[in-house]
Amino acid sequence: MTTLDAYWRLMRLDKPIGTLLLLWPTLWALWLASHGHPSLGNVTVFILGTVLMRSAGCVMNDLADRDVDPHVQRTAQRPLATGAVTVKAAVRLAVLLSALAFALVLTRNLLTVVLSLPALFLAASYPLTKRFFPMPQAYLGIAFGFGIPMAFAAETGQVPALAWWLLLANISWTIAYDTEYAMVDREDDRLLGVHSSALLFGRWDVAMVLLCYALALGLLFLVGQRSGLGVPYALGLCVAAAISVYHGLLIRTRERQRCFQAFLHNNWWGAAVFAGLAADLALR
C-alpha cells in the first residue's frame, strides 16, 4: 500500500524550494499589476495554484524520468524510482492536482482561464525537453514564469508589455539558478544523454550563470523604470546582486554540494526583489 509519505515526497512537499521559486515571480506580478494592492482573492488563488501546479509538475517530471531517476544519485530514492508509488497512481495524482488548480482558475476572469491552458501545457511538456532541447532551463523559465501574465490578467484584465519584460527577467533568473542545479547532476546527465545548460555551457558555466543573473537584474531594473519605482526597489535589486556574487563564489569550484547550496539560496534572491518592490509600492 502506498503511504502518504510517498505521495508527499512525490509532490516534493518536503522540499518547498521549487514552490518558492515559482511563487516569487507570481507575487512580483501581482504587486506590480495592482500597484501594491492585489485582491485577497487573487493572492489566495495564485498561492494555492502555485502549490498545486508545482506539485503536479513534480509528479509529471517523475513520470517522464521514471526510467532515468534510478540511475542518478540524487534522484534514485524518489517514490516512482523505488516503486513506492505506481505509475497509475502517479498519473491519477497528476490529473487530480491539475484539475484542482484549474478549478481555482475558473473563479477568475476569462483571460486568466485562457492563459491557464498554455501554462498547463508548459508544465506537462517541460520534462520532455530534456531529451531533445540543449537548454531545457530556458523552457523551465517560461513554465515557471507563466504565472506572471496570468497575474496581470487576473488583476487588470489584460497583459501589458511590462508583463512580458518581467517574464524575460524570470527566464534569465531561472537559467541562472537551474544551471546551478544542473551542475550537481552534470556527470550523470552526460552519461544518460540528458540535456542541460550545465553541459551546454561547459567550462563557461560559472560565467554564464553570472551573466544570466546580470541580465535578470538588468531587465528587472528596466521594469522598475517603466513602473516608476524608486530607491526601495533599487535597494532590493542591490541585495539580489550581492546574492548573485555570493553564488558565483559558491559555484566557482563546481563542487556538487556548493552548487546545490547556491541553488537553494535563490529563495532569498526572489525574496529580496519582492521585498524591495513591495516596500516601494507601500511607501507611495
Image (tube, grey):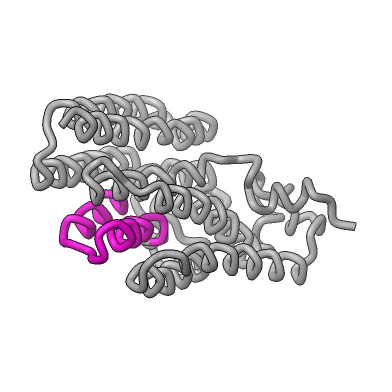
Give the image location of residue 59, x and y in percent: 63, 60
Q: Image height check: is 169 above or below 129?
A: above
Q: Nearer the viewer, residue 48 or 11?
A: 48
Can see residue 81?
yes
Q: Give left or right: position of 267 versus 63.
A: left
Q: Image height check: is 75 above or below 95?
A: above
Can see residue 208?
no
Give the image location of residue 278, x and y in percent: 27, 34
Report the quarter where the C terminus lies: top left
What stretch of residues is rendered in magenta?
A: 143-172
Q: Nearer the viewer, residue 266 or 246?
A: 266
Q: Is residue 156 magenta?
A: yes
Q: Give left or right: position of 217 versus 51.
A: left
Magenta part, dominant SS: helix
Q: Which residue is at 27% across, 25% downward?
A: 239
Instruction: List the single residue furthest toward the right.
Output: 1
Q: Which residue is at 19% across, 28% downward?
A: 283
Q: Which residue is at 62% across, 63% downward?
A: 97
Q: How many marks?
A: 0
Q: Which residue is at 33% across, 38% downward?
A: 206
Give the image location of residue 139, x and y in percent: 38, 62
Q: Give left or right: position of 87 versus 186.
A: right
Q: Is residue 94 magenta?
A: no
Give the image location of residue 200, x and y in percent: 37, 55
Q: Quadrant of residue 132?
A: bottom left
Report the quarter where the N terminus lies: bottom right
Q: Nearer the viewer, residue 265 or 258?
A: 265
